[in-house]
Structure formats: C-alpha cells, structure tokens
Image (spheres, rainbow, N blue to C red):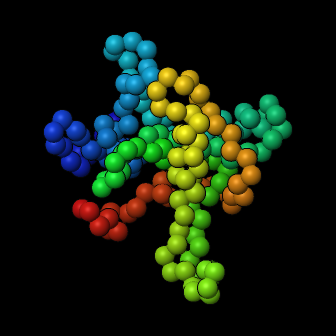
Amino acid sequence: EAKSIRRMADGKIITETRHGFVCANSGVDKSNVPGERCVALLPEDPDASAAKIRREIKRLTGCDVAVIISDTHGRPLREGEINVAVGVSGLKPIRDRRGEKDLFGYVLRVKQTAVADELSSAAELVIGQTDEGVPVAIIRGYKYIKSEDAKATELIRPREKDLFL
C-alpha cells in the first residue's frame, strides 16, 4: 500500500500511500476487523467508491447528497487522531475564502478551509473508533459547494509546498 516511507522511529512508520496520503502504516488497519490475520485497506480509488455510494443513495432515495469517505490520521506536532477525507463525491473538498473580507474588512489572503476534513472529523465523533459499530454519519444543515469532478487529493499539499520535508 506504500509508495514511499517518510519516517520510521520507535516502532512507528509514516508512509505515503499510493493515493498520496501521508499517514501511519499506509492506512492498513487491524482495528475493528475480525480475525487474527485480517486487516482493512483503503479503497483502491476512494473518490470512485464515494461516487458509487452517492449514485446508489440517489437511486434508492431520489436524494442527491454529497458523500465523504474518511480515515483516521495522526497529525504531526499534535496529540490525538482525527478523521480526514480520503474520498469525496458531490462537494468541493476545499472552500477557498481568499479575497473575501473578514468582519473588520480585512482581505483574507490564505484562508482555505478543508471542508471535507472538517466534516470527516465531526462525523467521527458520532461514528467512533472502538466498539460503537456506527458505519455512517449523516450531516444536515451544512451549506457546501457542489462539485461533480472534485477529488479528495485536492486536500494533499504538493511536495514543493511541504514545509517539513
């Protein structure tokens, strides 16, 4: 599942997956998987998986919803894990606020909100990480920007902008 190893220390391994995600153990997960020799892998194409789920929801319900597939990630320089988007369908994963004005009239120069990651983390509070057994969260009321061609890889910072390399 790994394209490259970024760091190894004290029994921990940080890799870059074939999708481009930098995370522990290439997204290979032993938790919440039955059997001693079984693991869960990330989908081959998380965006395509999200699109397939979205189409099926629309077919069954008539509702056109956005779908996010998420996974748990640790963060450098922060304790604790959060969920981040690894696949999206139907929404722009980043809301670019650059050029807009704040409450005091200052023009925003760097404000880009990782909407899909924020929603993934909020959903994880309901879904859980241990024995909750909740596979899906439904988020209502958030006004997202629709997109038919967005990809979760838009959330990945290009190497030339990586300050930690």
Residue 27, quarter of picture? top left
**76 or 55, nearer to the observer:** 76
- The residue nearer to you, when weighing 104 against 53, is 104
Q: Farthest residue in the bottom direction? A: 105
Q: Quadrant of the C terminus?
A: bottom left
**In the image, what residue occupies the spot 55% across and 80% down?**
108
State the residue in front, 18 or 64.
Answer: 64
Q: Residue at x 57, y 85 (%)?
A: 107
> In the visual, does 81 lie left or right of 118?
left
Residue 7 % position (x, y): 21, 48
Rendered location of residue 63, percent (x, y): 81, 41
Quadrant hosting residue 33: top left
Check the image and report above or below for 159 versus 130: below
User: Is residue 17 found left or right of 110 in the rendered image?
Assistant: left
Asked if one can make out residue 69 in the rendered structure from this viewpoint, the answer is no
Could you tell me which quadrant the N terminus lies in?
Answer: top left
**Does residue 91 appear anywhere in the picture?**
yes
Image point 57% across, 86% down: which residue? Answer: 106
Q: Count up the numbered dots.
A: 0
- Does residue 126 sit above or below 148 in this rendering? above
